[in-house]
Image (tube, helix red, strand yellow):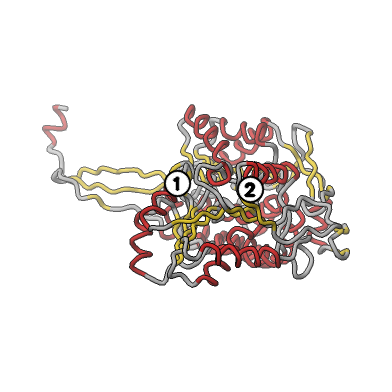
Amino acid sequence: MMITTTSTDRLLSSAVVARLDATPHVFIDGTRRATRSGEELPVFDPATGHQIAVAASAGADDIADAVEAARRAFTDPAPWRQMSPLDRGRILHRIGDLIYQYADDFAQLEVVDAGKVLGAARNIDVEFAARAFHYYAGWPTKIVGSTVPVSHPNIHVRTEREPVGVVGAITAWNFPLLLCGWKIGPALASGCTIVLKPSEETPLSALWLAELAIEAGLPPGVLNVVPGTGGTAGQALVTHPGVDKLTFTGSTKVGKRIARQAADTVKRVTLELGGKSANIILPDADVQEAVTGSAGGIFWHSGQTCSAPSRLFVHKDIHDEVVEQLTAIAGQLKIGHGIDEGVDFGPLANGAQLERVRGYVQRAQDEGATIYQGAQLPADLTGHFHSPTIITNVTDDMECAREEIFGPVLVVLAFEHIDEVIERANASDYGLAAGIWTKNVNTAQRMTRRLQAGTVYVNGWGLTDPAAPFGGFHQSGYGRDLGPDSLDGYLETKSVWTCTAEIPLERSEEQ
């Protein structure tokens, strides 16, 4: 298949072409199969707007089949749950190895399916998906219970950690492969089985990963991938009584609906939702370092990250200098198809997202804000591109300062005092991430304790590692992805009480 880019035509690898040309399918019980719904979804390259593939659109019957397969793999005769922890870890590690083996192909697939830039897709999305599997490969042998010192004589109490059961995982379109690692890795390490519904916008890498997992030795039915729409496949997965736990990454609006529906069957739920992250530059910061890091955080992947530092608070003494440097960076970004060399700024996910971002910018201007547009879009671009944008002369009550735009739009606000900026930073429905730029370590430590966010960056932005928990406060969700904390969402704790004193025979007969 030939992909038309902004400057040249480049052939994709044969492995990627095979994924694009594949017959629409779901992956259930270790095999590809056609949907029972018979429905299909077109898949588009966001950088061109051209259709590049056709994916299956699963219905409720397909979800039921996938849940049944996952339930069999968990309970009858539980090939995954009963496998030794060492062997489970080895399979997880092999999955990571296979991601590395096909790293360049996965990167290309993420470019044309999700609008990524090739270098970032390889070095971030693919790299950290593989690292997640390698990290969680070490956990099956380390999930242990404990001995509990109770106050009763001649009683021994211990705890055991057991897998919660069948996991329903729903991932977002902005990080298709990366989020697979975040969800699948800890679930498998815990001994759970999974039904994964990737976004209908970006289903291709998850389907490929499921096949590689079988190649790595994962038993059939342990990982099932069922693409489809949220309203049909997602709804069926959330409400299915055979699903014991849900893990979701996406919008706060959808997350609230999932939480309400999951309550009917008392499912466990982990939600990683939206953000409007506050990023604070203090007057003693290294301005160039702060500006470069802040620009990278908001403009990376065209601002389509839930933890993007979209609210930038700048001390009034350096406000104008910071805005000047930010606009200079925004004007130098090379916009284009992510498969082209030298491109550092790609498209938005789809036309609806582009119109949404345009609407926020226009309404900010209507409210009196000042708009700085960055690099101009090349005339030959046909995809869903939006120029990097900086908005100043903003007050905290404006829509652009309160709501998640999810695009390459940075809102800059001035402040005078630390107490003031902390109060303003925390005055948000969200609490996913926050940032501080300062040379004063003591100031940074005092501020990190007061900022209400699941992740706080000091003199940096966007760093991640599978060992570090990720999640939010407030309406940014609850529970955690990554790190040892995420395992808690996939494990049950059982208390076992054992009487160690000999019971007299006559007492036993009386009872």
Which residue is tagged 1? Answer: 479
Q: Secondary structure at mark 1?
A: loop
Q: Secondary structure at mark 2?
A: loop
Residue 189 visible at all = no
Q: Position of residue 110 (x, y in %)?
A: 71, 57
Q: Position of residue 432 (x, y in %)?
A: 48, 50
Out of 13 and 136, give the one closest to the viewer. 13
Out of 151 and 462, give the one closest to the viewer. 462
Residue 454 visible at all = yes
330 lies left or right of 165: right
Which numbered disc, 2 or 1, marks the residue closer to the eye? 1
The quadrant where residue 47 appears: bottom right
- Residue at left 43%, top 60%? 141
Q: Position of residue 217 (x, y in %)?
A: 62, 57
Out of 485 and 304, give the one closest to the viewer. 304
Say which mark, if any, is on residue 220. Answer: 2
Identify the image quadrant of the N terminus.
Answer: bottom right
Amino acid type at circle 2 is Pro
Residues at marks 2 and 1 touching, judged by CB atoms closer than 8 Å: no
502 lies left or right of 253: left
Query: Which mark sits nearer the N-terminus, 2 or 1?
Result: 2
Out of 398 and 246, give the one closest to the viewer. 398
Q: Residues within 10 Å of mark 1 (few under 14, many from 20)?
A: many
